[in-house]
Amino acid sequence: MDMGVHRVLFFPREAVALDVARELSDLGCRFVAVRAGQGERLWSVSSLAVYPVPEDGPEQLGPFLQDEKRRFAALARSRGGALLTHVHSSSGGVPAFSRDGLVHEDATARIALPTPLPGPRSLPPGAPRWEGLDFGDPGTEIREAVAVAKRMHGSPGAVPHLLEFLMDDAILDEIDEPGEGTREFLADLVRMAHHMPTRDAGAVLIIPYLAELARSQAMSPGARTSLLHVLLGYASEIDATAAAFADWSAMGGRVDVRHFTRLRDAVVTEIPSLVPLWDRETDAARFVLVSLATFCPAQTASLVRPRLADIPAPQGTDRADALALATALLGEDTNALDMALHQIAAWDSTLAEQLDSPHTPRPQAARAALAACVRRDVPDALS
């Protein structure tokens, strides 16, 4: 079996793109094409490289392909460009390749694998499991969700589109029917925010509602932690995007972050009134609050930093590394931030790739990495 890897590199000049295309041809790619970028004054180099799949299965190629992605990103960066696409099928196989702009073809080319193949990164030991994240009685919690929507928005005409269904008294009659619990109710609401077309700003407008639910003591610890988890996802998308597309932005590529900016700003407005709930929350919720607090340290650091020791994080665990990163962000300490980033990059391949680039904004990469650590560690009960 073979595995095909499709890569697309972008450059600001055609001559550079053609030079790189020749290099990729010499490396043994099966197909290479150079195309003018649509809507951008840029040129793309699209290639398909084919590798043999080891007898143990395509998953054995994972660490090797991660290294190759970093190598091709460095190649693009060294010529003033950016690697935007690096994709393959986890089950193997060779995808189709468009012949548009084709400059090289060798229909049987295969690139030999190194011996031995690189192994996976060593992960630090995990921290203790979280406790106390149970959901409560769905009748009580869904009634509170309805009551909060009505308190906040008063009448159907003033409610965000995504919350209009909560203003219908018929929903209270459905609560006592068997079936949907709080977990499913909140999950449906979040899915609607991500996927349902709306007449207004959609998810941006329901963030104050989600925050108010997270503040409500009528909601269970599991529900409140899940809501904080959702808010962290909204807040961190802009930083994850900035870190992932740093090379592309540096070469003049456009990244539309207006929606992500509005999401982040809406969450940041709520954070100063969420962090003071620290003492009533579970350790898991506190861990999410730490990550949220790093988005506005001027308002939150004095409360959160002295309490970081409340969170169980044995030395040497991934959670301890995340808290070291949070400490640096809350203290706005550049040297400590750099050390904490590289500690996590030793086992987080995504962050390691980002730190390869001098264009990656370190605070944004740090907040995105911390949010990713928290969201891996704290179970997303809504998924």
Image: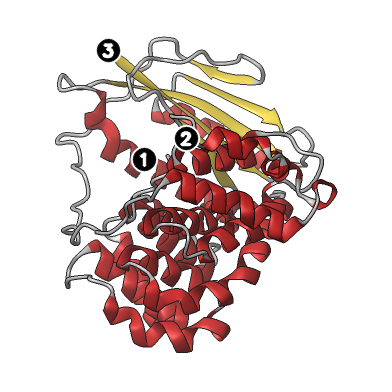
Q: In the drawing, what numbered circle is on residue 86?
A: 2
Quadrant, the N terminus = top left
Tag 1 residue: 68
34 vs 372, left or right, is: right
Amino acid of disc 3: Met
Q: Position of residue 373 (x, y in %)?
A: 36, 58
Q: Is residue 337 above or below residue 345?
A: below
The residue nearer to you, when weighing 123 against 35, is 123
Residue at left 59%, top 32%? Answer: 45
Q: In this view of the protein, can residue 129 be seen by the observer? A: yes
The secondary element bearing badge 1 is classed as helix
28 vs 191, left or right, is: left
Q: CA distance from mark 3 to mark 1?
A: 20 Å
Tag 3 residue: 1
The secondary element bearing badge 2 is classed as strand
299 vs 180, left or right, is: right
